[in-house]
Amino acid sequence: MEVDLLLHSASQLLTLSGGPQRGSELGQLGIIEDGAVAIAGERVQAIGSSDELRETFEPDVMINAFGRVVMPGFVDPHTHLIWAGDRADEFEARASGATYMEILSQGGGILSTVRHTRAAEPSELIAQARLRLNRMLNHGTTTAEAKTGYGLALEPELRILDAILTLDERGPIELSPTFLPAHAVPAEYEADEYVGLICDEMLPALVVWWGDRRSDTPLPFVDVFCEEGAFDLAQCQRVLGVAKELGFPLKIHADEFASLGGTKLAIELGAISADHLVHTTANEIQMLGDSGTAAIALPATPFGLAESEYTPALKILQAGGLLALASDLNPGTAWCESMQFVIALATRYMGLTPAQAIAACTVNAAAAIGREDVVGSLELGKQADLLILEVEDYRHLGYRFGTNLVQTVVKKGRIVVDRSRDGFR
């Protein structure tokens, strides 16, 4: 049988098969030793032993993994990909003792990035984001969520969303868009006034804009930042309630610095995920375990802020929750383009094993953006997004950090990154 590509001789082929992994199930990698993958077009045609697949298929291209780990591409379910400028001055201020919320209250933080992003041309936003995407791809991310949130007015928010869609169309990383106008209160508005603008004008306008730009795909996620100094619970409930009525799927930033009830709100409204969750209450953790809402932990953020508290991952798993990991790529707290580093942080500060962290970055991360039927695992009929690592044992992910262990990236059955020294045979 003819196929386009056959990858064989993987020391460990991590399939992550069987769907999202909740609670104590997290960490089932579905390892096939001396494994192989046959690819036809953009899809996985077969998974099995190298001997079996080499006897069965006649490939146009054959890749020898030479006894290295092969696994699904990383899925990053929470990024703030599109912005202009940087906040290196604020990093220095935090290193000197200033807090994140103090900087935000003085017009810095998110509002600083808003000023730079509003002033940037669309081509500049795309060019800067492209550099970040290239680094993400080289470190193994093949699918990512990307938020607006640095426009804080209809026109610049739509400009950011258009940049996300343009980058998605150009590939190779697929982007799942999220509309986040409720990221901070812009300087020209009071909070309730701005929330009214989002609900009465921005969300209805987005429905029309999306129908013109992407009528063939579902509406993007709508997200809010439920936090002291940003939007309170009632304001978030209003935004998400209107978004749900208009047909948008929902996400929420919650419990990063304080617990305001955002996680409970997300669950009650059927949000696909609640993100950050550093200070989530025990009751809400149990609610997560009984719900379909994924808990997305962002360990690069407390690390970037030099904080000691991280998402209580083990408690979420004990409650039976669906845990995912993400980078929170952003210019203020977590300029991190490597899911490998996220794994290293999760194994040190959240108590996860390397296997659990890998599952949280692949099949569970795909579920946290509603794409678990397409990406996040290597299974028959799913998209052929996979990595060849430079190591023989998957546990080097987490064990090693500060270096890039990805040798080869295959996206939709096509080699898009090749860092191998010896080439393919």
Image (tube, rainbow, N blue to C red):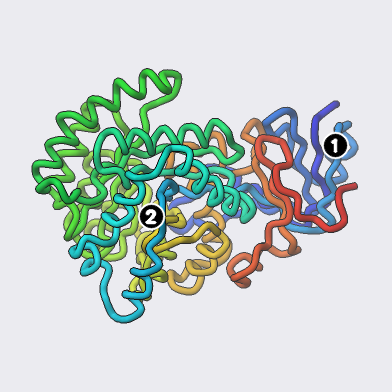
Residue type for callout 2 = Gly
Q: Count neighbours of disc 2 (C-alpha within 10 A) and say few if under 14, some if 14 to 19, many if 20 or more.
A: many
Confirm or deny contact between disc 1 and disc 2 (CB under 8 A).
Answer: no
Looking at the rendered image, the quarter that the N terminus falls into is top right
- Residue situated furthest bottom in the rendering: 96
Give the residue at x 41% y 32%: 162
* Residue 171 position in % (x across, y down): 59, 36
Query: Mark 1 or 2, which is nearer the eye?
Result: 1
* Residue 346 position in % (x across, y down): 48, 67
Residue 289 in sight here: no
* Left or right: 401, with 347 as reference point: right
Check disc 1 and report its element: helix, strand or loop: strand
* Residue 313 position in % (x across, y down): 39, 64
The label shown at residue 61 is 1
Check disc 2 and report its element: helix, strand or loop: loop
Q: Which residue is mark 2?
A: 320
Residue 2 in sight here: yes
* Residue 362 position in % (x across, y down): 54, 49
